[in-house]
Image (tube, rainbow, N blue to C red):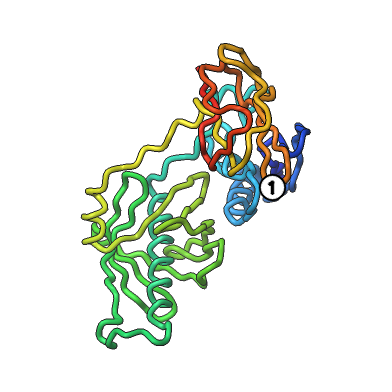
Amino acid sequence: MRHGVTVRNDTGVYEGGEISIHYDPMIAKLVTHAPDRLGAIDAQATALDAFVIDGIRHNIPFLSALMQHPRWREGRLSTGFIAEEFPDGFHPLVAKGEIELRLAVAAAHIDHRLNARKRLISGQLREPEQMRFELKRVVAMGKSRIELEIDPKKGGVEIVLGDGRRVTVHSDWKPGDPLWRGTVDGVEIAVQARPILNGYALSHAGVAVDARVYTRREAALAALMIERKGVDGSRFLLCPMPGLVKAIAVKVGQEVKTGEQLCIVEAMKMENVLNAERDATIKAILAKEGDSLAVDAVIMEFA
C-alpha cells in the first residue's frame, strides 16, 4: 500500500512592488509504503514529524494532524472531506495523553542538555559546587503543568513523573538541531523543536505547542504573571515594516473583497502593495498619504 501527500506553501500570495501573484506551489511530495493502509499512514505520520521546512509557511502541521484523524485512517473519504471535518479551518491538535507526555519529555531533555552545556562555558565565576543545576522541573505547555525530575543515566536519562512513573529517554540531540530524534521507553519519535523566548516551539503528531521548562520556584512565579493578550489583527491593517505611506486606495465605508488593494507603503526603495486578506468594510483610516509609520502601526480598521 502506497500513501502520499503533497506539501504546499499555503501563503498563496506574493506581494512586492506593484504586483500580486496568486499561486499554489508544490514544495514536495512525500510517499510512504507498507503492507496495508494503516501501516502506510503510520509511516507517513512518522515521516511528517521529521520533515523540517523553515523560512516559509507550509501545510505540514495540517497533514500531520490528518494522519491522526479517525475518518482518514478508516478511509471514509470524499471530495468534501476537508469542508466537512474542518468547517472553521484547521487548528493544531491539543496535546493530551501519550502525545503530551512525549512533548514534555522532549522539552525536559532539551532543557537538561542546554543546562549541562552552559556549565561547560569557560571563564565562569561560580565555584564548582555552584555549577550544579536543579533537576526537579515543571514543563509548562499552554495551561498544562507537568512536574518531573531528571535522573541522569549513562547513555541517556530517566525522567520520573509526578506519579512515580519512570520514563527512559535516549537522544543525540544537540543545541541548534531543529529536530529532536530519540526514543521514549523504546519508542522512536521525532519532535520538531524551534527556539522561542524562554522555551521551545514543539510539534509532533499534529500537535504544535510552546513549551517552557521551569524550576519549581520559577513555575510558581510564572503562574502569577498576567497573561498578555495580543491585538486582534483581523480587525486592523498593520504596517509590516517601517515605511512611508505612498497611496491609500480605499475610503471609509467602502466594501472590499479578498485580494483588493488597500494601500501602498514604500520601504527600502520598494513599493509594497497591501491587499485585503478577507472581505470587509473599511471602518476607519488612521493614516494618510505621506505619513512615516513604524512597524505594526495601524493603517486602517475594518468593520
| Horizontal and vertical percent position of residue 165 | 29, 61
Residue at image position (63%, 54%) is: 54
Give the residue furthest to the front.
Answer: 290
Q: Can the viewer see residue 262?
A: yes
Total marks shown come to: 1
Disc 1 target residue = 268
Residue 167 sits in which quadrant? bottom left
- Residue at the image position 54 percent from the left and 42 percent from the top: 295
Give the residue drawn at x 21%, y 55%.
Answer: 220
Image location of residue 152, percent across then percent down: 35, 76
Q: Nearer the viewer, residue 257 or 183?
A: 257
| Element class at badge 1 | loop
Image quarter hosting the N terminus = top right
- The answer to whether residue 78 is visible is no
Q: Compared to 15, does 56 lie above or below?
A: below
Left or right of 160 in this view: 28: right
Looking at the image, residue 85 lies above or below residue 31: above
Are there few (<14), some (14-19), or many (20+) residues within 10 Å of tag 1? few
Question: Looking at the picture, which amino acid does disc 1 mark?
Answer: Met
Between 258 and 102, the residue placed more toward the observer is 258
Residue 62, percent from left and from top: 58, 39
Where residue 232 sits, quadrant-wise, is: top left
Q: Residue at x 39, y 59 (%)?
A: 198
Q: Is residue 40 left or right of residue 283?
A: right
